[in-house]
Image (spheres, rainbow, N blue to C red):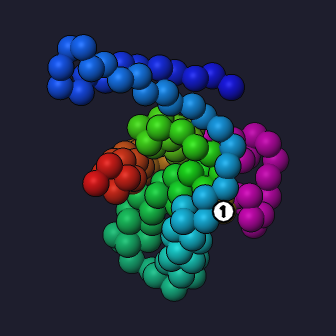
Amino acid sequence: MKIFKRATLTGQPSEMMEETSAIHLRFSAKNGLKSLVCFIALVVIALYVRDSFIRPTFGDALVVVWLYYFLASLFSMPVHWLASLVVLIAFAVELGQLVQVAAWLGIEPSSPLTVILGATFDWKDLLAYCIGGLLCWWMEKK
């Protein structure tokens, strides 16, 4: 396990405190519950909402929030690291849609994996992922 240290100034130069940030495995029921609520909202959106904003844009931002809280329920790490990781994962999935990874892998169009990986690339989705990542960071920092 890597431990990252940084000094924080607490007022006087002689009062330097040392903070450590470590990534470790642990379960957080609070974040697990937030993840479950987001997941239920995503399922409801996927099954019942047919519009041009809530499902494609809000849903993409909510996927990032869901993934953030899912991973936060399993791992303890700094907020900005986890939010960045989740946005990078979302970008990778979206870029996989651009190069048609599902077709390359021979995944059937009706497969649940195709639903997870998505089928069409959209630049607006990348913006929605960034908004979702910023929302995670903002909610955790307040």
Quadrant where the N terminus sits is top right
The answer to whether 99 appears left or right of 114 in the picture is left
Q: Left or right of 93: which side holds 123?
A: left
Could you say which is closer to the camera, residue 24 or residue 10?
10
Q: Residue at x 58, y 23 (%)?
A: 3
Q: Which one is nearer the viewer's eye here, 74 or 92?
A: 74
Q: Is residue 104 magenta?
A: yes
* x and y percentages locating residue 87 in the rendered image: 47, 42
Q: Position of residue 63 (x, y in %)?
A: 51, 59
The amino acid marked with disc number 1 is Val
Residue at horizontal 47 percent and vertical 20 percent from the top? 5
- Location of mark 1 (residue): 115
Which residue is nearer to you in this view: 23 or 67? 23
Q: Quadrant of residue 6?
A: top left
Q: Position of residue 51 (x, y in %)?
A: 39, 77
Task: Note whether residue 124 is visible.
Answer: no
Looking at the image, is 94 positioned above or below residue 139? Answer: above
The magenta segment is: 96-114
Q: Is residue 117 magenta?
A: no
Residue 7: name its quadrant: top left
Q: Residues within 10 Å of mark 1 (few under 14, many from 20)?
A: few
Residue, x 49% and y 27% (percent of image)? Answer: 20
Q: Residue at x 38, y 62 (%)?
A: 57
Which one is nearer the viewer's eye here, 87 or 23? 23
The relative height of residue 7 versus residue 106 in the rendered view (above or below) is above
Residue 16 locus on image (x, y percent): 31, 19
In what element is the residue under mark 1?
helix
Say whether residue 131 is left or right of residue 120. left
Q: Is residue 12 visible?
A: yes
Does 114 appear above or below 89?
below
